[in-house]
Image: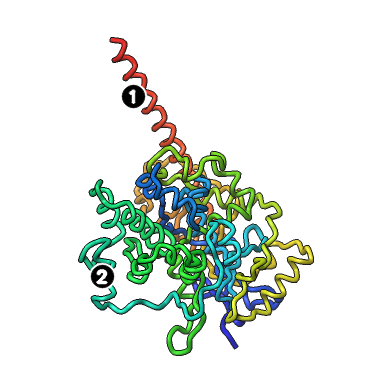
Amino acid sequence: MSTRQSIRTKSKTGDPVNGELENNGLPVRLFATDRYPFERVNMYSILWVRAVLRGSPEMDILMGSCFAGLFQIPTRRLLAGKVVHCMMTRQIVTKKKYEMWHVFGGNPFRFSLVEFGEVTGLPCREFEEGYSIDYQLPNKEENYEFWDRLIGDSRDATIEYIVALVESDDEMPRDIRLKLCLIVIVDGVLVAKSQKPWPTLKYLKLLESLDDFLALPWGRESFLWTISTLIPPLKVMGKCEDPVGVFCNKLRQQMIKTGFPLALQLVAFWTIPQLLQLVSGDDTITLLNYPEMSLPQHSGLIVAAVRKAEHNSVPMMVASGNHEDMWGLWDDENFDRRVNYMLELIEGGHVFTKAEWLGGAGDPLFLYGAKARTPKRKKQLDSDEEPASKKSRVGGHNTRSVSEGADGEKFRELEARVDEVVADVALLREVCKKQEDVINSLKVSLNGKGNQKT
């Protein structure tokens, strides 16, 4: 029997979070309800390509291609924050290879090729017979002939190098400039494989024919790279006995995603209306008409905002069906009876609750809206007794008294409340920083006008 169906999820202390799991027919959680770790997910931008090709015939070619939809994505939906990581930690464990299911406020929603195509506008039809995303061209000199024509004989070139190459050569032939920009979009945005991505040899060689390059179903290519690192791998005997546990540990640390993980954030905003309502701005500003050269940093939703939306959960958009062209179906997809049962409940209009979703790793419990009372300190009187050591105090409470008299579960709840306060303070700091920037800009503008009058 697969471990995915017989999981006894344990917390960091080794105790099962939900005890011996009841079999209610639904998939189990990756992380237990309201027990999610914190981490950052890196994002990418295509504003550079827009700036380089703005007003040129090459930009017209690009906007007439399959990549046009990327430039039409509303900018506010692309702001880097915690949404991707929060959705990854709220997923449930299934046998599926090409689907990712999440539970937000008790309600399930899906991330699959269908949703990926909807939010990116990229073509997701099936590949030509015999094509494989894993196939890589051999490192032979004849395969590098077109590489040498585009970026020179450097075999260690990165996407950053290509950007510098384009910016440093104003006389670069326009067709070469366009092809290098296409590599930046594909290897730097859609199929990024590291924090400092590099060009892929087979993609560069495919650019020998621009028509062949643009005809590839890049949505399908990007999705397969994306989903591969967003869900736990299947168990392989003799290689990894606990893939779910290993994946949870990675989520507690900094981990680099491949592909285009930002698509998961786009699907979350599309599916969860109350989440998008917390993002400032509107959808009329897209990457194509955004006035700046780069997106602001640290301006996306933080954990506190995601938890607020989850606490005030409202009915979400119904999960999409299969695409009319049937490219959302996979010949080698795994059957999962728990997912099928969940789909039956969704189609039947079942109202889900948090309590129905069992299992999951036992990270600190989060209770929305619970405020920890801080006891007032008594005025210290003159005494021969030594003051309590700072090391013996956690959050204003003596660790000795906690370990001896307090319930360990209540102590973990208190820690979670402290995390909430820290997140709220971080949000306030971001707001203050933005206001400070606005004030400084106004000061500079007013000083400039004053100098002109004198």
256 left or right, relative to 233: left
Toward the viewer: 84 or 291? Answer: 291
Question: Residue drawn at (44%, 32%), measured in percent from left and top?
Answer: 435
Question: Residue drawn at (48%, 86%), measured in percent from left and top?
Answer: 236
Residue 50: x %, y % from top left: 40, 47
Residue 82: x %, y % from top left: 48, 54
From the viewer's perspective, is residue 344 above or below residue 179?
below
Residue 146: x %, y % from top left: 28, 67
Give the amino acid type for the residue marked by disc 2 in the picture. Glu
Q: Secondary structure at mark 2?
A: helix
Residue topped by disc 2: 145
Q: Which numbered disc covers residue 444?
A: 1
> Which is more foreground, mark 1 or mark 2?
2
Toward the viewer: 277 or 139? Answer: 139
Q: Secondary structure at mark 1?
A: helix
Screen quadrant of the C terminus: top left
